[in-house]
Image (tube, rainbow, N blue to C red):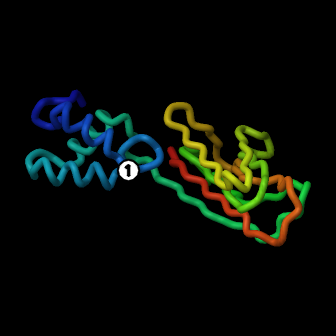
Amino acid sequence: MPLTPYYRPPDDTIRTVKESAPNTFGYITRVEIDQIIASMGASGPVYDRLEDLCGAFGVAPLQTRVHEFDENLVVPAAAETTILSYVVPVGQTFEVGSWSAWANVDAEYYLRVNGTQRAGGRTSIAEPSLRVVYLFKAITATAGQTVTISTLRQSPAVLLPFKAELEGVLNG
């Protein structure tokens, strides 16, 4: 369905919303789209307007957001240990939007898809958090694949919690 002036908000509205969108994926969420639709008035079919807005923002209207968090209290030094694991549901493709890992210790972190390292980073006591955000080319995993975040602790330390967070969208 082509965009029409009746359904499409002015370009300055789109630009303002894109710049102020508070999510980590760099695009607007369905909740924010619903808020925009409500502010535009009740004229026209809401579903058509939602599709137009999604097209204007480059968002598939049927995406499902995923947010996973986990921690591991038993991380030995010099042995890679999984902190978080996520299995992509049947019939879906998962796009990693961002991932984070942190602990108050020197460590390396790895993002793997079915055991293959796809990304990684290192932290220190001075910079204890790692945050990776993908705005354009996300790491993808298909149905049945496992996405893991693991760590390799570099320094011996007392028992500390290692935490990880994974965010993305399911397309299916």
- At horizontal 55% and vertical 42% (from top left) the residue drawn is 133
User: Which residue is most to the front?
Assistant: 126
Please identify the quarter of the rendering in which residue 67 is found.
Answer: bottom right
Residue 93 in view (yes/no): no
Say what amino acid the circle numbered 1 marks. Pro
Q: Quadrant of the N terminus?
A: top left
Q: Where is residue 164 shown, x and y percent of the image?
A: 66, 59
- At horizontal 27% and vertical 42% (from top left) the residue drawn is 17
Q: Where is residue 24 shown, x and y percent of the image?
A: 47, 48
Residue for badge 1: 22
| Depth check, front residue: 80 or 153 | 153
Q: Where is residue 101 shown, x and y percent of the image?
A: 67, 55
- At horizontal 38% and vertical 39% (from top left) the residue drawn is 59
Determine crowd level at label 1: few under 14, some 14-19, many 20+ residues with C-alpha closer than 10 A: few
- At horizontal 70% and vertical 67% (from top left) the residue drawn is 71
Would you say 58 lies left or right of 42 here?
A: right
Q: Where is residue 170 shown, x and y percent of the image?
A: 52, 48
